[in-house]
Amino acid sequence: MYKCLMTIEEAQIAASRVMQRCNELAKISEIDNGITRVYLSAEHLRANTLVGEWMVVAGLQIWQDAVGNICGRYEGEKVAASAILLGSHLDTVHNAGRYDGILGVLSAIEIVSWLNKHKLHLPLAIEVIGFCDEEGIRFSITLLGSRALTGTWEESWITCKDSSGITIAEAMKNVGLDASNISAAKRNIKDITAYLELHIEQGPCLYKENIALGVVTGINGARRLNCSFIGKSGHAGTLPMHYRKDALSAAAEWIVFVEHTTKRYNSYLVATVGKLHCSPGSVNVIPGEVHLTLDIRGPEDVLIEKLLSILLDQAHIISLNRGLRFYSNQYYRIDSTVCDDNLKRIIEHSVKFVQNRSITLSSGAGHDAVAIAERWPVAMLFVRCDRGISHHPKELVTENDVALGIQAYMQAIYWIAKKK
C-alpha cells in the first residue's frame, strides 16, 4: 500500500511541464507588462480554451459549465463513480503572480496525465476544475465559480456591476453564457466524494522553515468593516489644541491600539487597517471626518469575534473621551473553514512519504475550498513560495518543490480513492 506511485523522474517531468504552462498562461493577460485575468473577460475564455486543450491531452473529458468553470473528468473503475475533485482557480488579481491558483489546476492535470499514461483507473473518478472567479476582482464578489457548484450563488449577484457599469448578467451574455441557467452548474452531492486543492502558501512559514510542503489545517475566517470617526473641522491656526475634535488623531490612536492589542491577544490572529480617507483633507484644516477599514482574520471564529468586540469597544471609548462619534458597519463576513480530519491525515502521511517530515499550518488567505467545504469534505496541500510573496509579479516557486508537491498529491489521491 505504501509504495511510491510516481517516481522522482516522473514528478520532475510533470513539474517542468507545469512550470512551462504557468508561463504560457501568464501571457494571457489584459495588460502587457504583468498578469491580469478577470472573470468573464476575453482572457478568461482564452485561458479556459488552453487549459481545456491540456486536459484533453491528459485524458480528461471536458466541458465548460454554466458560469464559466472549465471542467474535466477521468472515469474510475466503474462508469459514473463518485469523484475526487481536484483544482483551483484560473482568475487573477490585478498585476498578479503566475502561480496563485494556476499551479493547483495544472498540477491536477498532471495527476490525470500520469494515471492515463499508466492506464490506471481508481475506484473513484477524478475530476479537475479550473474555477472561473475566486478572487472577485471584477464584480467584488469572491468564490463565484465554486459557489455555483455548491448551489449557493445568490440571485441578486447577477445585477452586480463592474467598474464600467456592466452587470454579471450582461457580461455572461457577452461571452455566450446565460444568467438564467446558473443553477445548471450545481453538482449533486453524490457526484463528489472529496475536494483536494494544491496551492502556493502565499505566506512565509514554509520558506522560514526551509521545507517544501505543508498540510493545511483550516482556512481563516475574516471580518471586514467600514469605520468612521466623526469630529469637527476647524482652522488649523486659530483653534487651540484642547478645544479640538480631531477625527484623525482619534483614528490614529485607535489604529495603534488595533496593532498592539492584536499582537498581544493571539498569535494566530491578524488585524489590518488598509484604507483611510481624511476629510476635508487640507493642510490647514483640522480633520472633521475619517473613514477607514478594518480587516480581522483568524482560524477560530470565536477568537475573531472576541477581538473585534474589544477593538470596537475601544474605538467608542476613544471617541467618547475626545467628544467624537464612532460608527462601524460590517460589510463582509466569512467563517473559518476546518479541513477534514481524515483527508488531512492522508495528506500529512503523503507529505511525510515524499519529504520525510511534515508541518501543519492554517491558511490566512481565502480559497475555493471555503465554498466547497459547505457540501463536501476538503483538504489542502501547500507548496512553498519564495519569501512568502504572492499577489505580486515576483511570486515564485521552484520546480523541485512543485515536483514534490505533485508526488505527494498523487499519493494522497491514490490512498483516498483506495480507502473509499
Image (cartoon, grey):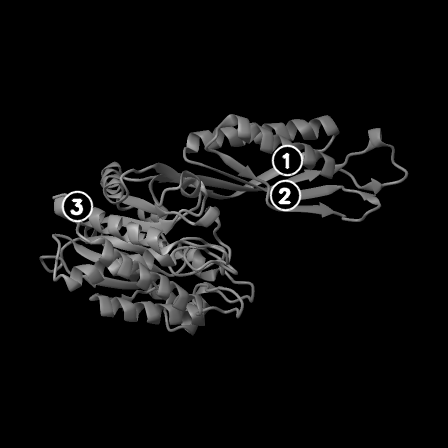
Looking at the figure, which quarter contains the C terminus?
top left
For disc 3, the marked residue is 415
Q: Along the horizontal axis of the image, is 141 left or right of 195? A: right
Residue type, numbered disc 2: Leu
Looking at the figure, which quarter contains the N terminus?
top left
Query: Which residue corresponds to the image point at 64% horizontal and 33% vertical from the top-left?
Result: 256
Q: Give how far across and how far down residue 189 sits, in percent.
A: 22, 50
Q: Give how far across and how far down residue 310 sits, in percent.
A: 55, 27
For disc 1, the marked residue is 255
Which of marks 2 and 3 precedes in the sequence?
2
Tell me the SS state at disc 3.
helix
Query: In the rendered image, which quarter is residue 103 located in?
Result: bottom left
Question: In the image shown, does 97 or 229 lie closer to the viewer?
Answer: 97
Task: Tell me the tag on residue 292.
Answer: 2
- How many angstroms separate mark 3 from mark 2 (CA)? 48 Å
Residue type, numbered disc 3: Trp
Which of marks 3 and 1 precedes in the sequence?
1
Tell me the SS state at disc 2.
strand
Task: Tell me the tag on residue 351.
Answer: none
Query: Which residue corresponds to the image point at 84% horizontal and 45% vertical from the top-left?
Result: 284
